[in-house]
Amino acid sequence: MVKQHRMKVFFIMLFCFFLLVGVAGCKARDASGGETKDGKVKLTIWLWPGMGIEDQIKQYAKENNIDVDIQISEFNDVHNNLTTALAAGSGAPDISAVEVKGIDKMKANPEHFHNLYDLGAKELKGDYLEWKWKQAETIDGKYLLGLPTDIGPQAMAYRVDVFEQAGLPTDREEVSKLIQTWDDYIKVGEQIKAKTGKALIDSPNALYSVIEGQSGEKYYDQKGNIIVKENKNIKRAYDYAMKIIDKGLATKVDQWSSEWGTGMTKGDFATLLAPAWMMTFMKENAPDAAGKWDLAQIPEGSGNQGGSFLTIPKQSKHPEEAFKLIKWLLSPEQQLVTFKESGNFPSTPGIYENEDFQSVTSDYFNGAPTAKIYGEAAKRVKPVLEGPKSIQIEQIIGDAIKRVRDGKSTPEKSWNTAMKQLDRELSR
Amino acid sequence: METKVAAEKRQGMSTKKQLKQSVRDHISGYLYISPYFILYGIFGLFPIVYTAFISFYKWDILGTKEFIGFQNYQSLFTDPTFWQALGNTFSIWVISTIPQLFLALILAFILNQAFIKGREFFRLAVFLPNITSLVAVSIIFGAIFGEQYGILNYFLSFFGIEPINWKASYLGTHFAISSMVMWRWTGYNAVIYLAALQSIPKDLYEAAKIDGANKIQQFFMITIPMIRPMIIFTVILSTIGGMQIFTEPLMFSGAGGGASKQGLTLTLYLYEEAFVRNSFGYASAIAWVLFVIIVLFSVINLFITRRIQSA
């Protein structure tokens, strides 16, 4: 008798447990799309701030009679949450933005995403830059994880007022001509330092990452082998960063800190090596510096920094609708709209020659023709192949530079420490 | 015949009912407490056990698990970064907790004095930092400790002190993070101490006064021994909290803990391993080692604070 009742208790508890799990399950299922009460398709979309495509998504939803739920969180959180949701098997959105370094991690497990080639992406390939497209493709070329959003060609933003004080030319053509090589750049920096006492660049790390990106190969070769120690260009970039520190031409503030924004406003540093998407950030973080910055070309060729993709996780119940949306949203016409609104540079070369595109200028940058300058830079980009450990390698060498900057180590010692850390990292 | 059977049946049913009643009470009892245990099972116990399970695997959470036995633990103990993180955690704990608890005790003692007017206001005021957003606090402290435009360096410049790069040095980073912890938790501990102080019977002090004990003697001979349980409680709580310090170093030094890993604490290292490097097995091993460290450390602290009585 008692035994029977114990069983009963057990079953009741089990029932409660399933009830709870069921409730929790419902909630999780809600996160990835589904349908609203009136039968409309509902797409959940994860973005981070500054992508500049929210309004267009809303417009599309209205025109096509679907519901969208745009959820914006911090850059790192989007990637972490997506990884967790994919692993958990529920909770992922219908569409998620993924940055280029993030997509390299995802490429190891493409089965978590809808293969966009199956949804008809092949015919779109010609619209986009080839190297950008390849970043979202698995090495065997059979699987496409995402459609390209923006790219990050780099230009040099410079302070007109500081250049003037230093007795340097301020016209953007002349500045581009004056600074043809990195040695020219350092020479200009020395003049600025002597005449105004200001720094040439915000951070030696920024200089490092631009120079390392100029050679076409960075940490990985075309086959996916790690070549950090063999690649002379990495050491060259490191040595230039050391030179800048040694001559006192860089500030000690970290990028993305609040002091960085202050320095940007006050003109503590005369130049900033800025990928196209940085324009939005500068306008927001240093609004008082409007008209004081201008844009010129970077010496020795441009590189690409960042840029993202829109992916469709496998958990999405409406991959067709989601694909239709991103196909429209990332079409050349719509990327032009995005560029005009926010400055995120299109990944569709077809519109670079478009008059409507070329005529875009920015008051913040002293009336500079941003489209022309970044368009020029985009043509000079040498695509770089990133790999699954790019983020860690970048961090290890970046820390090495910072240690020297902060006077905590010497260039050689710091490099050796970094190489030891790298060995440990790669052995795991 | 029929009635007999019916009667037996009835009797049987009534005993059944009786039994049912007592069992029913048991059932309802279990039902009342079940929500807690079910929720704890799902959100508390399961993750703990599962963490132990995956600490024996190599797993990037998207791919497949690979069983590697104790290898995660082995490489953890030879990992210089782990020891560094452990050192940082202890250093920050010492710099923040020890002065903090003394300060809280003094604060509570002052608030408990009869001559203080508007005691409610002060009590609220010292507790207020505790309910502010941790991220907001970290951003503001980050700005205070800035090298170039930080207000602290600005004040120091009046005394002819050169700007200090707080974020770059070990001691500067530990000091800045500790100051955040202190700002936030001193008032919290003071309120706990205050409650303990108010529960001490007044006649003890009166008797001591008659015996000729001065204020300081009263403090050490009556106050401290009487609030000893609360001191133990706060020491253990701040040990557990201090060993798990995370948001402050993350906001102050970034996910990697800075270029020399000067702000890397154990939980920050765990987070970095799990969410930057995606080695969830290794991160789980860190979590379990951290658990053992906290238990050990709490026991040591308990042992030390128990001796307060003899002081």
Image (cartoon, coloured by chain):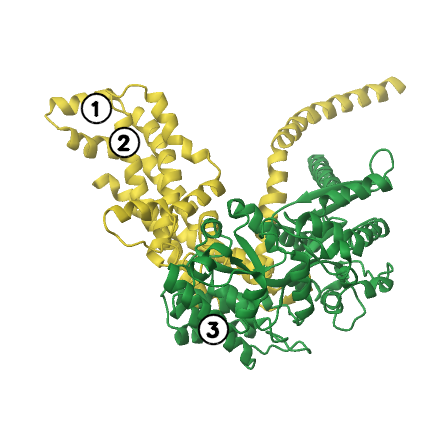
Q: Colour of chain A?
A: green
Crowd tier of the residue under label 2, counting other residues whose Cα lies within 10 Å: few below 14, some 14–19, many 20 or above = some
Q: Given the image, on which type of amino acid does mark 3 rest?
A: Tyr
Crowd tier of the residue under label 3, counting other residues whose Cα lies within 10 Å: few below 14, some 14–19, many 20 or above = some
* Residue A124, x across and y down, in percent: 84, 62
The circle drawn on residue B204 is 1
Give the side of residue B44 with respect to residue A121, left or right: left
Report how far apart the C-alphas of labels 2 and 1 lie in the structure: 10 Å
Camera-nearest residue between A16 and A379: A379
- Disc 2 with disc 1 on a shared chain: yes
Confirm whether residue B257 shows in the render.
no
* Residue A331, x across and y down, in percent: 80, 55
Confirm whether residue A108 shows in the render.
yes
- Callout 3 secondary element: helix
- B186 above or below A368? above
Camera-nearest residue between B56 and B254: B254
* Residue B113, x across and y down, in percent: 25, 23
In what quadrant of the picture does the N terminus of chain A appear? top right
Quadrant of the rendered image containing residue A243? bottom left
- B99 above or below B19? below
- Callout 2 secondary element: helix
Find out whether the residues at labels 2 and 1 contact each other: C-beta distance under 8 Å.
yes
Q: Which chain is yellow?
A: B
Q: Given the image, on which type of amino acid does mark 1 rest?
A: Leu
Chain letter for the residue marked with disc 3 in the picture: A
User: Which dot, 2 or 3, sits closer to the camera?
Assistant: 3
Report how far apart the C-alphas of labels 2 and 3 lie in the structure: 65 Å
The circle drawn on residue A240 is 3
Q: To which residue does mark 2 refer?
A: B226
